DNA sequence: TGTACATCAGTGAACGCGCGTTCACTGATGTAC
DNA sequence: TGTACATCAGTGAACGCGCGTTCACTGATGTAC
């Protein structure tokens, strides 16, 4: 918020300051339409300074994207810790958190799921961006263990749930839902379809147990 | 392909020619990065001519977006007609068609689900853009009728299936899937999760019948 | 049927402006001796 | 501890260019009389 008044000629941590400045600008404006000069100004430096730390604007956006994935992963971990391990409630809460994250940070969605977020990344970056998914996969694994279901693959189930949840997030963000169903409640629909999905799973796995 | 050599000073149908030119450029380049001059050139007119028919570039993109929704709706109708009415196969085929459409027309996805496609539209445009969904809803209704399931709402189910399918489309397009599951088959996963979903529905509706 | 005139879809050239990026230069920092 | 020097993170100004859009003008079309 307040710019340090006693800043010296050298910033100290301009790299991170720029990432945060860009993220704030994106969040406040609700779009990716900030300029490098905007980000530099907010970080308290001239418009040429960012180029000491980022090759170009794309590189800065990539870093902001990583921050978005990190935030999603962190909030997923918090959700998992605050719910009973192995419960379906954990899985549902993770999905609702995902949807809420996308709704609250709509422009970040474009970053994370647009050209930049889906570009090829090295393993380290990928794993960081995927940490939220691994939380879901672990929650599914715990659920299957708790119920002693062995006939299904937790990775397979986690991907299917991810698709469901991501679809709800995308649809809700598109703003089209109220046209179809004026008082549709995404969180409730996500809850019931997750339960429906696991109920279906039971009919399959029961015969295998 | 071939520009009519005997074209007079007046084009005749420049409005539609520009929409098609823009759509082709998007498809060929795989991005939305064409210029108004590109579209005009392809339609065989000068770069100022488009402004007789479209207020600005956004208006042209909106028209292309409508074309995308129309194409999706048409292919959905074809799928529905070529499968047994009331069958789960129809529903699955509609989903797989949706995913294939998004994969094949990736840049159109950005148009249809980005800023432009999700902008407020009048009822006529909305209904045209939603015609694919109505095909799915009808297929769900036919399925429920055929099985004499009355306890569930076809609109509710259709939205949930839409979310699932859309999620698979988005995830598959992001290119991240192979990182998690090297030989994941989206069409097969969509098939099995749709069946799982309806199996779950049976466990609910059985008790109501 | 022929001429005058309004209308409007085209042309070609240029404008303008936003913004990413570069350039020559400067101020601060740290380290060798 | 003090001085010289390499290093590098900053500055301020400007460049350049891509591209959407406008402008004055022209060619074709259709209709009134």
Image (cartoon, coloured by chain):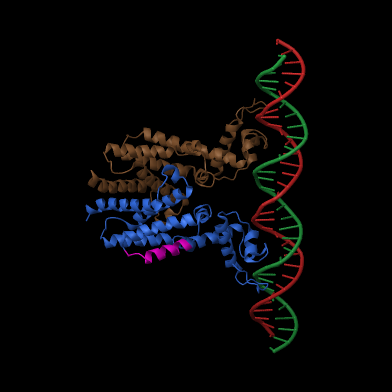
Chain colours: A blue, B brown, C red, D green
Q: Nearer the viewer, residue B122 or B18?
A: B122
Q: Position of residue A11 (x, y in %)?
A: 64, 71
Within the image, what quadrant is residue B33 found in?
top right
Secondary structure predominantly adopted by residues drawn in magenta: helix
Q: Residue at x 40, y 33 (%)?
A: B78
Q: Residue furthest front?
A: A183
The part of the chain drawn in magenta is A71-85
Number of marks in the image?
A: 0
Q: Position of residue A67 (x, y in %)?
A: 51, 62
**Looking at the rendering, in which quadrant would you find the C terminus of chain A?**
bottom left
Above or below, A150 against B60 in this view is below
Within the image, what quadrant is residue A178 found in?
top left
**Is residue B36 shown left or right of residue B168?**
right
Within the image, what quadrant is residue B47 found in?
top right
Q: Nearer the viewer, residue A181 or A59?
A: A181
**Looking at the rendering, in which quadrant would you find the N terminus of chain A?**
bottom right
Q: Position of residue A163 (x, y in %)?
A: 40, 51
**Is residue B122 shown left or right of residue C20?**
left
Q: Is residue A117 visible?
A: no
**Is residue A178 shown left or right of residue C31?**
left
Q: Nearer the viewer, residue B29 or B154?
A: B154
Q: Is residue B167 visible?
A: yes
- Magenta span contains residue A79: yes
- Magenta span contains residue B137: no
């Amino acid at each position: 918020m307040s710019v340090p008044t006693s800043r010296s000629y050298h910033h100290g941590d301009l790299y991170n300051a720029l990432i945060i400045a860009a993220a704030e600008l994106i969040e406040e404006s609700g779009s990716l339409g900030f300029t490098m000069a905007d980000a530099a100004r907010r970080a308290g430096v001239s418009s040429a300074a960012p180029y000491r730390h980022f090759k170009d604007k794309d590189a800065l956006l990539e870093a902001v994207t990583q921050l978005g994935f990190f935030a999603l992963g962190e909030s997923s971990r918090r959700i998992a810790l605050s719910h009973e391990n192995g419960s379906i409630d954990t899985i549902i809460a993770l999905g609702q958190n995902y949807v809420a994250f996308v709704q609250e940070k709509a422009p970040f969605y474009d970053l994370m799921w647009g050209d930049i977020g889906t570009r090829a990344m090295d393993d380290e970056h990928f794993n960081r961006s995927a940490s939220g998914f691994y939380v879901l996969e672990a929650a599914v694994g715990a659920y299957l263990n708790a119920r002693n279901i062995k006939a299904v693959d937790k990775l397979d189930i986690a991907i299917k749930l991810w698709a469901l949840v991501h679809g709800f997030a995308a649809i809700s963000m598109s703003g089209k839902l109220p046209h179809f169903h004026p008082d549709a409640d995404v969180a409730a629909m996500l809850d019931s379809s997750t339960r429906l999905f696991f109920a279906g799973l039971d009919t399959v796995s029961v015969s295998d147990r």
